Image: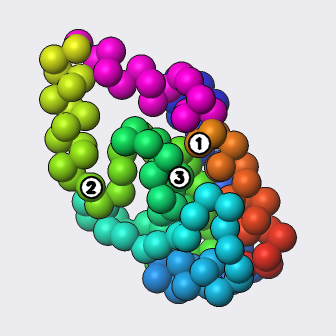
Amino acid sequence: MAFGVKIKRVELSKAYTCDELAEAMKASGEWEMGEPFAVKHGFAWLVAFPPIDRQNQVWVQPCSKEPAQKWQIMLSHDIAGDFGNMAKNALLDAVTDGWASMGSVFGKKAKAGEKQVDDVIEALKSRNL
């Protein structure tokens, strides 16, 4: 990870839409980081896990048009579907000249997010999704 960015790619056993992948993930058993859910964020659909905090969340996004077999797992500093939180973070950044977002790059929550990215990849592989 460099400067709060962690993105890894994985190829799944078959092609899924976001809804299908979220349902398959739920059906495969419990996830340590919480229950995955499909959500629209901007113009894109993705599978997200519950936020770690207001600035860190693990996303699973298709690498191409859905249904996709290749997906990227990333640590995002936005919370999927929570535009109120995005507005609050943008305002805090403006007031603090960007210092309010430093927690999303460094600290225990960011490290937990980095680990979750790797854990999601291992779980997807071990569950043969």
Measured in 3D between alpha carbons, the distance from the residue under mark 2 to the one under mark 3, in whole angstroms, is 14 Å
Work out whether 51 lies above or below 14.
above
Query: How many numbered circles are shown?
Result: 3
- Contact between marks 1 and 3 (CB within 8 A): the answer is yes
Comparing 41 with 12, the one in front is: 41
Query: What secondary structure do most residues of the magenta stretch adopt?
Result: helix
Q: Residue at x 29, y 60 (%)?
A: 81
Q: Earlier in the sequence, mark 1 or mark 2?
A: 2
Magenta extent? 97-111
Q: Position of residue 116 (x, y in %)?
A: 65, 49
Work out whether 72 lies above or below 14.
above
Q: Amino acid at mark 2?
A: Asp
**Relative to 78, 127 lies left or right:** right
Q: Position of residue 33 (x, y in %)?
A: 62, 58
Q: Earlier in the sequence, mark 1 or mark 3?
A: 3
Q: Amino acid at mark 3?
A: Val
Measured in 3D between alpha carbons, the distance from the residue under mark 1 to the one under mark 3, in whole angstroms, is 7 Å
Is residue 61 in view from this perspective?
Answer: no
Quadrant, the N terminus:
top right
Comparing 48 with 62, the one in front is: 48
Q: Which residue is mark 3?
A: 58
Q: Which residue is mark 1?
A: 113
Q: Earlier in the sequence, mark 2 or mark 3?
A: 3
Secondary structure at badge 1 equals: helix
Q: Which residue is mark 2?
A: 82
Q: Residue at x 66, y 67 (%)?
A: 31
Determine if the magenta segment contains residue 82: no
- Label 3 Cα neighbours within 10 Å, binned few <14 / some 14-19 / many ≥20: many
